[in-house]
Image: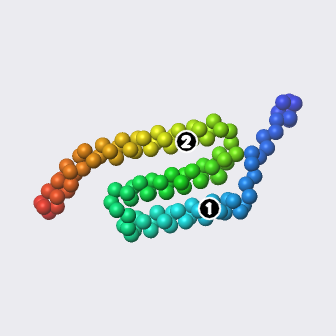
Amino acid sequence: MTEAHEDHNHGFAHAMSPVILLGVFGALIFLTVVTVFLARNPIIPPGFDIIIAMTIATIKASLVVLFFMHLIHDKGLNAIMFIFSFVFVALFLVFTISDSDQYQHRISDHEMSTEATQ
């Protein structure tokens, strides 16, 4: 084996405390319970339910990336790329949702005509 390979230390990036990991896991479970509760009990006005669900999903994804994938201890460039990817996904969703308002009445009319023929 060459010296370059012997001296190369891969090492472990960052050890996270089990308390922190269990706390993040508990937060993920709590947010999942909140999501399921809100899906089964429509207490949020229509139109805001998707915003709440996507916000909860974004928080959960951020927790996973920050703590379980150790992005919280990583270089700033990776964090910037992570943030920009969320911004672009949000932009695509906003454009898609705003565009769906243009033809929603056609979908409703089609559903009513389909129900009337049955």
Give the left or right position of residue 6, taking residue 40 as reference.
right
- The residue positioned 62% from the left and 61% from the top of the image is 25
Comparing 65 with 50, the one in front is 50
**Closer to us: mark 2 or mark 1?**
2
Image check: 100 left or right of 40? Answer: left
Q: Which residue is mark 2?
A: 83
Residue sitting at x 40%, y 45%: 93
Question: Are there few (<14), some (14-19), or many (20+) residues within 10 Å of tag 2?
Answer: few
**Residue at far left of view:** 117
Give residue 71's position: percent from left, percent from top.
Answer: 65, 45
Q: CA distance from mark 2 to mark 1?
A: 22 Å
Residue 88 at what x, y percent from top left?
47, 39
| Rendered-image quadrant of the C terminus | bottom left
The reply, left or right, for residue 48 in relation to residue 100 is right
Residue occupying the point 21% across, 54% down: 108
**SS at mark 1?**
helix
Q: Does the CB distance between marks 2 and 1 fall below 8 Å?
A: no
Q: Say which quarter of the image contains residue 30.
A: bottom right
Three-letter residue code for mark 2: Ile
Q: Which mark is residue 25?
A: 1
Which comes before the other along the chain, label 2 or label 1?
Answer: 1
Say what secondary structure mark 2 lies in.
Answer: helix
